[in-house]
Amino acid sequence: MASSNTFTFTRRQVFKTSVAFGGAIAAAPLLSACGAGSTASKSSGVVAKAAVQAVLPTYKPSNAVTADIPGVPGANGAASDPAFLTYPASPPASVTGAVGSGGSYQAVSPLWGSVPPAGNSYYTALNQALGATLTDNPADGTTYATMLATRFASGNIPDWLAVPGWNVSSIQNFAEGVDKFFKDLTPYLAGDKILDYPNLAAIPTGGWQAGVWNGKLYGIPLWTSAAAVQGALFYRADIFKAAGIDPSTVTSADQLKAVGKQVNAPSKGQYAFEDLTKYLYQVFNIPQNNGNTGWTRDSTGKLVNGYEVPEFLELLNFENSLAKGGLIHPDALAGDSSKAKNRFWAGKTVITGDGTGAWNKSDAQSGVAASPNYERQAFKVFAFDGGKATMPLYPGAGMSSYLSKSLSDAKVKELLRIADYLAAPFGSAEYLIARYGKVGVDYTMTAGAPILTDEGNKVVTDVFDQLANCQAVTFNAGYNQMTKDYAAWQADMVQHATKPMFYSMNVSEPAQTAKASTALEAVITDVRMGRKGVSDYQSALSTWQNNGGNQLRTFYEGIAKQYGTGN
Amino acid sequence: MASITTQEATAEPAPRRRRFGRPRRQGPPAPPRPRLSFRIRLRRDKSLLLMTVPALLLLLLFNYLPMAGIIVAFEHYDIYQGLIHSNFVGLDEFRQLVANPDFWHAFENTLVISFVQLILYFPVPIALALMVNTVLSTKVRGFIQAVVYLPHFFSYVLVITIFQEFLGGAGVLNVFLNKHGISSWNIMTDPGTFKYLVTAQAVWKEAGWGLIVFLAALAAIDQSLYEAAAVDGAGRWRRMRHITMPGLRGIVILMLVLRLGNALSVGFEQMLIQRQAVGAGAADVLDTYSYIYGIGGGFGSSTTMGADYSYGAAAGLFKAVLSLILILGANRLAHAFGEDGLYRK
């Protein structure tokens, strides 16, 4: 947040692009056939839709400020994020009365960047406003999953803990851990009870749904958006312009490849594509859910995985042909995804896949530093065959934060009031303190936008807003054209939104099926990079089916029968 | 008795001269010393023993105590149940392991890469040591040593980046080739030649460091042997063959024993970093297999789909047991050659 001002998935999206694919398979040791053991009953974390509805809080939108570009409703409950071009000149207050009552709390949240010094001006300003001592000990975002797994194994849980959605799969049987370590917030927030905390009530319901485990409400949603999707296919608009290419002609996979060939110039060190990985799932209509292949029913009503649909072969053929055709940058083929952004900035690649959060102010600044004319734009959503395009939605909240089970009733209420403060809507007075610190010290209002000072750049970073925050909005101070372009792209994209099967159901899959998927993904990478052929994939697929895929199918068939499919 | 002792004392240097390089273990056995009782030895060595206590404690705490974790391989480990209460499944994880062709593939890769490294990497530091040893100027020698040591201090991340920058598809070499219309050479992404690539990286990074121990062994060879041989008319090659080589024999065999014991550890980071570049088929070795399938989930890799601690532990234990057998076997072999091996028999 210190440098980027798009309040969607910003910095962590960089990481997410690689990690969200890591797998939504939570690691629950499956009770095997010999399961007469003493192991406690394992849960898949799921309950029926009606039971989820019963614990969800009432949604009461905030009317503190009006967006310059209001959210546009789309298909299947999707909506684009509201966008702002300036920060309100006289920010209204959204919290009344005292927030904290002098309590002292420890929190842990992920941070991608250097940890600011303790007791700095930003922390002090916020704690003063809160009337409590909230100490956040940020942990490195790239290794956050390791830290979480260790905490879960040892039972050392802080008062307030942020858990990114894409880390859930690396914690063995998360659904069981939630029950064991986290406070059930249902008695505090379900239904109209949330109206005691108006800013929390203004978070859309989709976000809260992501925090429901075992039929109880545990998680406070973060970065809630009704337009949360895997990402987009981006292109360098300046290079397209110079080559005289009209991006609106790209409405099928063949056309994508054709424009790729036009901009591919290896002798200049410019390649058409980055490794597009799973960003092509959307294009090829592969059933997916939260970053991995998902499930759908075939014409006979049988559950089939995204790996098994015929379109997956089309996808592999396409990716394979890009690699073999020399259209992908060699370093991307060598698996170096960490420098993908740098290659795009420098014009070494022209077309890339990334999270939507990559489209922001700080990206533009980094890009212009590498190539003066840098401009990022995204292709409008299209389907590989030029037919009807679909865009599968992600759960409403990319992350959730949880309170420790050991907290007393009074402390939970104090922390919820603090959460309410941190979730103050964009445009309010509290938002400025929560995200920018002390005016004059950490930031100044310049041309209708809060701009961090030198001091602010050192100390203000994504710390407290990784514990609770308001609905995602788009705002890029000083880059209003970008905000408008992004809002327009989102407004079009949400019209294609679909809800995947088992959408936002928080399913913990049996751990022993993970091996099969890991092995299959390795073969997919080989085919995508052009090292193996599509026929190799087909034999690997039958191995996958026998070693875990069919077991997963039965597992999901059971979920569908018992709890429904979430749609 | 007294005469024998005298004779021994005078005869001692003789076998050293005749049987070059094997001075320590040869010759008639020393007269048996009276064996002291345990208690007397304890009293005599107590200060020495006391000094080993901290090291022993560390060994116990960090090497032996954690071994209790091996039990994970025999149960369906559940972090909420802990080591004691998780479901005990006996050898089930091992059954799954040996039934999995991917595991055997990783095993095969390990052996192949290890063998290639043994043939292509192991002799390099010896050859380097012999060459450096012939340089007489201490300044030049110091400079050469410093230059070849340096890569040892680089991490593999850096080493691979350097290789990528030079030999990668967008690296110096291929940009040059492309500019001149010659087709590019994809050594960094070719699964078929990956074993040679990793060996080349290992040589570049570690050969200079491996040099140290052989240089030390060379320095320990008695210079008078060379002088005497030269006086007797032995040329450069004969001196090398009859003085230098036998002088190095002991250390070469010791290094070989250690190397065999480590035969199944062929460079974890190296494989993990380049796994995406050449694919799991070429880059999965036992260490990475155990990591990727055991705990790999969510570590920034798009190729792992979740953690299965027990399975990973089983793969790791399998490797550890094989390594132990290998090192004991190699040690026996060393003893059979009449060398010290890991300890003096």
Image: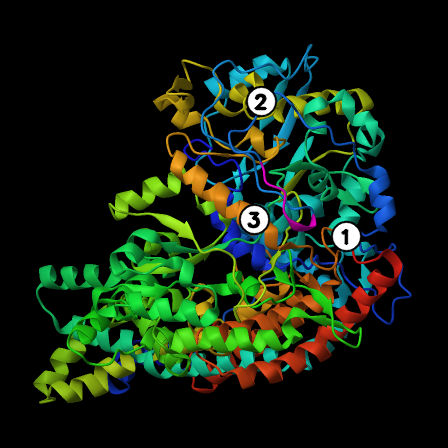
Query: Callout 2: residue from which chain?
Result: A
Query: Callout 3: residue from which chain?
Result: B
A513 or A233, nearer to the observer: A233
Q: Which residues are magenta?
A: A71-76
Question: Mark 2 sits on what residue?
Answer: A65
Q: CA distance from mark 1 to mark 2?
A: 51 Å
> In the rendered image of this protein, does residue A45 appear above or below residue B170?
above
Image location (x, y in percent) of residue A168: 66, 50
Question: Mark 1 sits on what residue?
Answer: B82
Question: Mark 3 sits on what residue?
Answer: B53
- Amino acid carrying label 3: it is Val
Q: Answer whether residue A74 is magenta in the image.
A: yes
Q: Residue furthest right?
A: A36
B136 or A205, nearer to the observer: A205
- Amino acid carrying label 2: it is Val
A76 or A463, nearer to the observer: A76
Q: Nearer the viewer, mark 1 or mark 3?
A: 1
